[in-house]
Image (tube, rainbow, N blue to C red):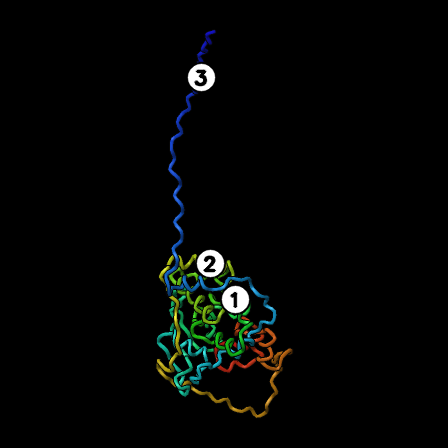
């Protein structure tokens, strides 16, 4: 019996509109690795940690203020003033150490600033710890021995003569909380902070690292600064006039103007007090300003 062959009718496939081809989005270009020997390269090698507690911090933990660590017969503050000021006038009889006058090209503001030594004038120019000592304490310095902490506080690499009021606004801030107002100096400033932290084995916080990196990405070839001992001299030497006060016929004991809590500046600093500045801190009158710089208990 013949089999009937049934024909199957093909079902037409519905037409689908062609989807236009979209080229894939380009992958972001990876950030190039920093060049060897740059500040960016050094930053990448710094440990990143949180702040340690500030417990135990006092200025005295970093040795006597402005100690003569290089043994040149002059305190560190005057060494930095001689290095950073121009048109120096030096006091006779100090072996080319003590700065009486000079002019600062302030790196933080870009303005010229006159320095005149005196109780009411010296604080117009201050010597800044680029890595503030309190910041250093919370980021590894408390693990250093006393000799290394004293070196950190007096290292010319970590010190700059700057405009006094601008330095006061900085406080103990790191790069995440404070940067100099002069944009042209930002790269040099953060590179110096990195150099100090590398030299003394300190760390940075994540926010600090990011702030420094943002600056250094604008100047990727920025290198780390170096510093060396500051030679004595370098200015005009003058003798300061001496005045004699006639001895009164009847001496009157001076009124008590001493610190009611501490017998010496050393004790006050060890307890976390000071420095006291002429014209702003009433405690200034309690101590003798031996170098006439307008600051005591430094």
- Residue 11's label in the rendered image is 3
Decide if residue 268 is on the left or right side of residue 102: right
Q: Secondary structure at mark 1?
A: loop
In the image, 60 versus 199, the foreground residue is 199
Bin the neighbour count of mark 2 within 10 Å (Cα to Cα): few under 14, some 14-19, many 20 and up. Answer: some
Callout 1 touching callout 2 (CB < 8 Å): no
Q: Position of residue 277 (x, y in %)?
A: 53, 73
Q: Residue at x 36, y 84 (%)?
A: 237
Q: Find the distance from the CA under tag 3 to the CA under tag 1.
A: 81 Å
Q: Find the distance from the CA under tag 2 to the CA under tag 3.
A: 67 Å
Compared with residue 196, is residue 241 higher up or lower down, i.e. above or below?
below
Q: Marks 2 and 3: which is nearer the front?
A: 3
- The outermost residue toward the top is 1
- Residue 205's label in the rendered image is none
Q: Position of residue 231 (x, y in %)?
A: 38, 81
Quarter occupied by residue 19 = top left
Decide if residue 253 is on the left or right side of residue 7: right
Q: Choose the circle earlier in sequence order: 2 or 3.
A: 3
Residue position for label 2: 211
Q: Choose the circle earlier in sequence order: 1 or 2.
A: 1
Q: Choose the circle earlier in sequence order: 3 or 1.
A: 3
- The outermost residue toward the front is 1
Residue position for label 1: 172
């Amino acid at each position: 019996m013949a089999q009937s062959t049934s024909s199957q009718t093909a079902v037409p496939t519905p037409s689908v509109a062609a989807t236009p081809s979209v080229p894939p989005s380009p992958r972001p270009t990876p950030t190039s690795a920093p060049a060897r020997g740059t500040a960016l390269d050094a930053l990448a090698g710094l440990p990143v940690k949180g702040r340690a507690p500030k417990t135990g911090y006092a200025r005295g933990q970093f040795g006597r203020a402005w100690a003569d660590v290089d043994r040149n017969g002059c305190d560190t503050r005057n060494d930095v003033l001689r290095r950073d000021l121009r048109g120096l006038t030096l006091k006779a009889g100090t072996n080319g150490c003590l700065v009486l006058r000079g002019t600062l090209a302030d790196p933080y503001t870009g303005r010229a600033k006159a320095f005149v030594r005196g109780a009411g004038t010296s604080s117009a120019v201050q010597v800044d710890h680029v890595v503030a000592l309190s910041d250093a304490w919370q980021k590894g310095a408390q693990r250093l021995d006393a000799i290394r902490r004293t070196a950190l506080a007096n290292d010319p690499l970590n010190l700059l003569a700057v405009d006094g009021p601008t330095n006061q606004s900085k406080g103990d801030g790191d790069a995440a909380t404070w940067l100099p107002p002069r944009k042209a100096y930002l790269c040099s400033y953060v590179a110096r902070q990195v150099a100090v932290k590398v030299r003394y084995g300190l760390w940075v916080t994540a926010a600090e690292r990011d702030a420094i990196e943002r600056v250094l990405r604008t100047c990727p070839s920025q290198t780390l600064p170096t510093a060396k001992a500051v030679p004595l001299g370098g200015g005009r030497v003058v003798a300061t006039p001496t005045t004699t006060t006639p001895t009164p016929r009847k001496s009157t004991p001076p009124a008590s103007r001493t610190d009611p809590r501490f017998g010496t500046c050393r004790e006050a600093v060890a307890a976390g007090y000071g420095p006291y500045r002429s014209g702003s801190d009433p405690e200034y009158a309690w101590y003798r300003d031996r170098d006439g710089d307008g600051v005591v208990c430094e």
